[in-house]
Structures are given as C-alpha cells and as structure tokens.
Amino acid sequence: MNLAKDAATRAYAPYSKFLVGAALETDDGRIFTGCNVENASYGLGRCAEQTAIQKMVSEGGRKFTRIAVFTHSSPPSSPCGACRQVLYEFGPDARVMMGNDSAELIEYTVRGLLPGAFGPDNLEQA
C-alpha cells in the first residue's frame, strides 16, 4: 500500500483532482506501480490500475497475484468497471487491496469484484 500511495503522488489529475496510485506484484515477485493520467480529451485518460498492468506487460509480465490501490477517499475507492476487466485478464484470482490515508482497508479478489466476467476461457469455447 505504501508503494501505491507513493505512486498516487505522481498522478496527473488536473481535471478531477482525484489522485490514484496502484502497485501490483507479479507471480515472479516483481513490483510495478502506476498512477492515473488524465487528458483534456477525457476518454483518453488512463487509470492507475491499467497503467500498472501496461507497465507489467511491457516488461514481460503476464500474471499478477495482488494489487494495492490507494486513494484519499473514504471509504477507499474500488477499481472502475474497465479496470476490473483489465485486471481479470491478468489475474482473475488476484487479491485487490483498496486503502486510504485513514488506514481503512477493503479487500476482494478480482473475480469477487467482477462476477460472471468475460475472459480468455470464453474465447476458447467459441
């Protein structure tokens, strides 16, 4: 969670002012962080969780086992729907820990956040 909190300090959020940081751990123990990056063309922004996933994949990672997501909100914010789908692709059973400045902590699995998810297995059945 400390790495996710540190990543939030680097967020680029001039429009929403909603800073988010993420830190994920791969199945081989590597850590990748990310922050949200907004854009004046709102749809082109990137969430912290997706930034961390993209960094992992660009460095050869394909699976993560846990991710910490830090926000200043109370209760801690959960990943958005798009992030849940991206997380499912690379770690359906990974732990998702959401925390904030007040040491509130909420924990789920990715599968728990996205029941009935569409994933790679669905394509194999086509």
Image (tube, grey):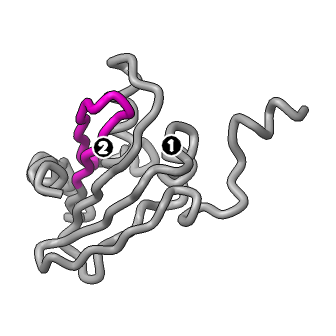
Tell me the SS state at disc 2: strand
Density class for disc 1 (Cα within 10 Å; few <14, some 14-19, many ≥20) is: many
- First to last magenta residue range: 21-37
As shown in the figure, which amino acid type bears the numbered disc 2? Leu
Disc 2: which residue: 24
Q: Residue 54 occupies which quadrant of the picture? A: top left
**Residue 124 seen in the figure:** yes
Q: Residue at x 24, y 57 (%)?
A: 20
Does 36 lie within the magenta span? yes
Residues marked 2 and 1 touching at CB (< 8 Å) = yes
Give the residue at mark 1: 91
The dominant secondary structure in magenta is strand
> Of label 2 and label 1, which has the lower sequence position?
2
The answer to which quarter of the image holds residue 64 is: top left
- The C terminus sits in image quarter: top right
**How far apart are the alpha carbons under marks 2 and 1?**
10 Å
Residue at image point 50% right, 43% down: 91
Q: Residue at x 33, y 38 (%)?
A: 51
Q: Amino acid at mark 1?
A: Gly
